[in-house]
Each structure stands twice: as C-alpha cells, then as structure tokens.
Amino acid sequence: MQCLDALEQSQWWPKDKLLELPHERLRRLLSHAYDTVPYYRKLFDERSMKPDDIKDSRELAALPVLTKQLIRNNFDNLKSSAFSPKETVLSATSGSTGSPLRFYSTKEDQLECGFARGLRAHKWAGYELGEKAVVLYPPPRFLSKPGRLGKRLEYFFKRHLVIDPVTLSKQTMPLFVRRMEVFQPSFIIGYPSAIYVLARFIKKNGRPDFSPKAVMAGGEQLDDHHRELFEEVFGCETYGNYGSWEAHTIAAECPEHTGYHIAAEDIIVEIVNDAGEPVPSGTEGKILLTNLHNYAMPLIRYDIGDTGAISSQPCTCGRGLPLLLKLSGRIDDVIVTRSGRTIPGIVLPKRFLAHHGVEQHQLVQDSYDRLIVKLVLDEEYTPEYTDKLNKLVVAQYQSILGEDIAITVQFVDRIVTAPNSKGRVVISNLPTNKVF
C-alpha cells in the first residue's frame, strides 16, 4: 500500500520530474548489475564501459538487446550474487508469445511494486479494493491443500467470483450467468477472449440482470470488436491492461482511452527496430523492458516479444506518464471440443514448459478430435527424456481439455510463424460460432 500511495502521487508529476525517478533507479540497478551479476560485469568490461557511462534511459541503447535465448544460454550468470536462494522467487512466463522462459525475481518486486502498479491501473477504471468483481482468469493449478484453502480465503476477502475460463461451455454458461446475477458484480476482470465467449452467449440469450461499472481486460490482445461487444452486452466501458509475468503491470488505460499509460516510475519501455536502435515516436517497433525493481536477475533491455509505439503527445487526463500506442501481439485462438466447450488458448497451461527444456511451442487444432502440440527443445535430449516430456504434456493438457480430444505431441526443429499471425501460439482452424 505504501508503493501504491507513492504511485498515486507520482502519476501527476510533470513529465520532467517524473523521468528523474526512473533514471535514478536505472543508475542504481546498473551499478548493482555490474557489481553482482557476472553477465553484466563481462558485458560492460568487453565494451570498456562503466555503469556511470549510462546516465538515463536514452543512453541504454549502448547495451545490446537481451533476448530470451540469451537468458537461457546465460541463466546462471544472470543471477545476482547478492541474494541467497531463500530471498529469490523462481518464476516462469506463460509463453503467450510461444517461448516460455524461467527467471528469478524477489517478493518485493512481485508482491509490493508489481501488485501496486496493478492496483493503480484498476483504480483508473474506478475499482476500489473490496468491490465485487467477476474474474475470468484461471486459478492456480496443482496447489497443496493449504494453498487451495488460502486461495479460497483470498477470493472471499477480495469479494471475487472466480470463473475458470476452461470450464466455459453451452452447458455451464447459463449457470455462470445466474451466479453472476446473484453476485451482482461491479466489475468484470479477465482475458478478452474469455470475456468475449461469455458476452456472446449473453447477447444471444438476453441481457444480464446486473450492471458492472467497467470491464478490465488484459493478458492478451484487446481489439475493437471486443470493446464493442462488451459495451453492447454489459453497458460499460472497457479498460485495457498490458502486463507480463516478468514485470506485472506495464501499462494501462485511463478514462480518456488515448493509449496505455506506461508505469514509467518502475519500468523503462523502449521501442526499437530489428537492430535494437530506438525508433521515432509514433513508429511501431519491438518493445524492450527494463524492470527497475528486479535485483535478483536484472533484465535490462529485455525483448518481451511484443510490438508497439510510444506517443509524443501527452494524455488529456493530465498524468505525466507516457502513452503506449499500437500495442500488438499475444493473439490466441480458442480450442473447441466436440462436447461444446470453448477454451481460450491463453488459459492453457504453458509456464511448466519453460522448466522442461522447451524453447518454443505452438498448438494447432484442425479437427474437433485432435490437438497437435509442437515443441522445440533448447538442446538434444535422450529418447527417454522426450518420452517422459511427451507423457507430461499429454497429461497436463488432457486434464484441462478432457478425454474427448486427443493430444498429439510433435518434437520439431523450429516453428515458423507467418508475418500476419504475430504472437499466435494457439491456431484453431475450426469455426467457433457453432458452440453459442
């Protein structure tokens, strides 16, 4: 809450004053990385540089882009020697762009600074802690019994009605709508594709007997057709949120909806070309992130795998935070089962792949009866290992999708993504309209 209080004040600072804070934090992070992280010590020494040579984010281009492959190849050398194992948290990305990744962080980075940015973004949509919300995100899986009890208590005290998107079907959605009408939520929070599945069902079967104040959508691409349907069905505005496992909330919309305000106090966002060079304002390019609070494994100029552009114009809301425009990436299709379940691809388990040597993955559905899981491994593995991984993947996906669809795992050398399918990890060639 102290982090949140600070963020609520700094968002109104003038642009020049606001930039002083991340620049100071950047200098501190670079000095820490040089002193305690072997990868960065070598990087600076090879370039005959010192951390003091980089005064602010505009000079970050002197350092190379940090790709996911570089992180995998230098994993141990990217860890800071200043932290003991008990002080760090091993996490993994969801693999929403096809390349899951392991990384280390700290509780301060995740549970204090990261959550505070998320709470501030929700407040922009009018949400206050304790207000009722329907949440269409998958709950954590494979928790211990105390862990499951803890989650239920968390949802109870937050007053969240959690609906697992993998359970959405023609049979279950009438029950979910009735539960929502009894619950009377003030907000709907979740993946755009999951909310879209529910909204299409509601549109076909009549308006719901509740009136949320806003829809807050994130985790994947939020498009105009999502917003239009949500406004038509729920009668309220939609607020987009851009985040990642590596940095939590990165940017979010304010009531003006002129773009996504970057949480510039905590995260430096660069837009660059393929050579890693900054591009002019308004020009679309690769998004690079520098999380200013992850001291356990600093990720400096990290290529997250998305694209966007930064506006040169201030927002009319008066906040000094820069605006991210033309955000693209993370587009997933849905999986349709013969029994009528419609499962947004974004909710399928992918994070575990990062812990088992998977460099890239893609899911393809060409029939109601089979899902093909393509995996690219980061090195040569024995037949015994790939057989074990095959069984693990089948078990994980079968537990979500059920027995009415066969899971086929294919180990391939590479996955080629079409230029017009940026970020698509789940490709379904089936019509979804039959299930509504």
Image (cartoon, rainbow, N blue to C red):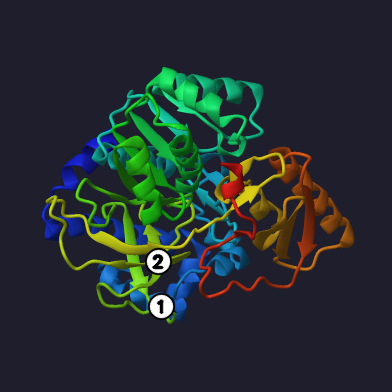
Residue drawn at (50%, 29%) of the image: 162
Q: Which mark is residue 38?
A: none
Residue toward you, 395 or 27? 395
Q: In the rendered image of this protein, does residue 158 appear above or below residue 221? A: above
Q: Position of residue 109 (x, y in %)?
A: 41, 44
Residue annotated with mark 2: 288
Callout 1: helix, strand or loop?
Answer: loop
Considering the image in quadrants, where does the N terminus appear? Answer: top left
Residue toward you, 387 or 89? 387
Considering the image in quadrants, where does the C terminus appear? Answer: top right
Residue annotated with mark 1: 276
C-alpha distance separating marks 1 and 2: 9 Å
Q: Position of residue 65 (x, y in %)?
A: 45, 72
Task: Choose the circle earlier in sequence order: 1 or 2.
Answer: 1
Q: In the rendered image of this protein, does residue 142 appear above or below residue 267? A: above
Residue drawn at (64%, 60%) of the image: 429
For badge 2, the amino acid type reads Leu
For badge 1, the amino acid type reads Gly
Q: In the rendered image of this protein, does residue 152 appear above or below residue 43? A: above
Left or right of residue 160: residue 2: left
